[in-house]
């Protein structure tokens, strides 16, 4: 896997929402869920050709979609915000991949901060880190995605430390990994930018309930 550049905490609504097919009237774009910036309030420029294609898909449809049938506005797409997910970095990466003359399979990842205007509780924060992964190749299926997710969560083990007995010198440390997150459930979900889509849940022993640990799907064309 190659790491995607994620050093832009400030992102345009275009890459955070529009390029991911989220309609401009979607509730998640409201100030109750997103931190919008006052200065600078707008992105200086967007890729003209690609912006026109995104506008057409939103307003008229295309690539197998009937679109949302509304008047898409460039001013709304240019609004700056604190990114709500690192999927905006995936959108940029896919755009660059599509511009290559010859397609070559890629595997990308990123780990970085995202920001949401959330009420704080045991499972929600206003700022947190998101792990993002993206695989682009021909012939991939939902089964491949589920297999990668199971492997990823299983490898999230915890290290241990070996200690010596009473009166004995401490033994050298070792790193014995626990099984990681193995209790997983996949639930069908809706994302504007993936189809099919799945939420991933794991049982939390401390909270004594199933909690969402991930979101996933197959990117739309």
Image (cartoon, helix red, strand yellow):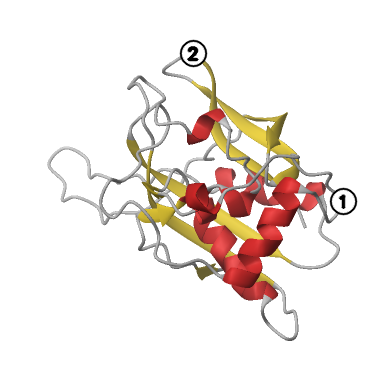
Under tag 2, what secondary structure? loop
The residue closer to the viewer here, 124 or 154, is 124
Q: Residue at x 64, y 67 (%)?
A: 50
Residue closest to the eye, 119 or 61: 61
| Residue depicted at x 83% and y 47% | 65
Give how far across and how far down residue 90 sits, in percent.
56, 59
| 148 left or right of 202 in image | right
Left or right: 193, with 87 as reference point: right
Q: Can residue 115 be spotted in the picture?
A: yes
Residue 5, quarter of picture: bottom left
Please say if 109 is above or below 198. below
Q: Quadrant of the N terminus?
A: bottom right
Instruction: Pinpoint residue 170: horizontal percent, then vertical percent.
Output: 19, 50
Query: Vertical placement of 86 versus 201: above or below?
Result: below
Image coordinates for residue 100, horizontal then vertical, percent: 68, 82
10 Å neighbourhood of mark 2: few (<14), some, or many (≥20)?
A: few
* Cα–Cα span, label 2 and label 1: 42 Å
Circle 2 or circle 1, nearest the eye: 1
**CA neighbours of label 1 inside 10 A, class few (<14), some (14 to 19), many (20+):** few
Residue at image position (54%, 40%) is: 179
Question: Which residue is denoted by mark 1 in the rendering?
Answer: 64
> Which label is found at residue 208?
2
Q: Quadrant of the C terminus?
A: bottom right
Q: Nearer the viewer, residue 14 or 211?
A: 14
């Amino acid at each position: 896997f190659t790491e995607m550049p994620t050093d832009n905490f400030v992102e345009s609504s275009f890459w955070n929402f529009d390029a991911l097919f989220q309609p401009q009237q979607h509730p998640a774009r409201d100030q109750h869920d997103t931190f919008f910036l006052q200065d600078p309030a707008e992105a200086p420029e967007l890729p003209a050709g690609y912006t026109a294609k995104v506008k057409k898909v939103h307003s008229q449809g295309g690539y197998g979609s009937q679109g949302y049938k509304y008047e898409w506005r460039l001013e709304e797409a240019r609004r700056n915000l604190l990114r709500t997910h690192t999927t905006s970095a995936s959108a940029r990466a896919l755009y660059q991949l599509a511009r290559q003359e010859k397609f070559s399979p890629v595997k990308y990842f990123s780990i970085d901060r995202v920001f949401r205007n959330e009420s704080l509780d045991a499972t929600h924060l206003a700022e947190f880190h998101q792990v993002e992964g993206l695989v682009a190749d021909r012939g991939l299926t939902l089964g491949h995605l589920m297999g990668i997710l199971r492997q990823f969560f299983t490898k999230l083990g915890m290290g241990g430390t070996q200690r010596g007995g009473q009166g004995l010198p401490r033994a050298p440390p070792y790193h014995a990994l626990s099984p990681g997150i193995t209790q997983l459930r996949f639930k069908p979900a809706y994302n504007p930018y993936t189809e099919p889509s799945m939420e991933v849940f794991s049982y939390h022993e401390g909270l004594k309930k199933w909690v969402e640990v991930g979101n996933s799907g197959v990117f739309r064309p």
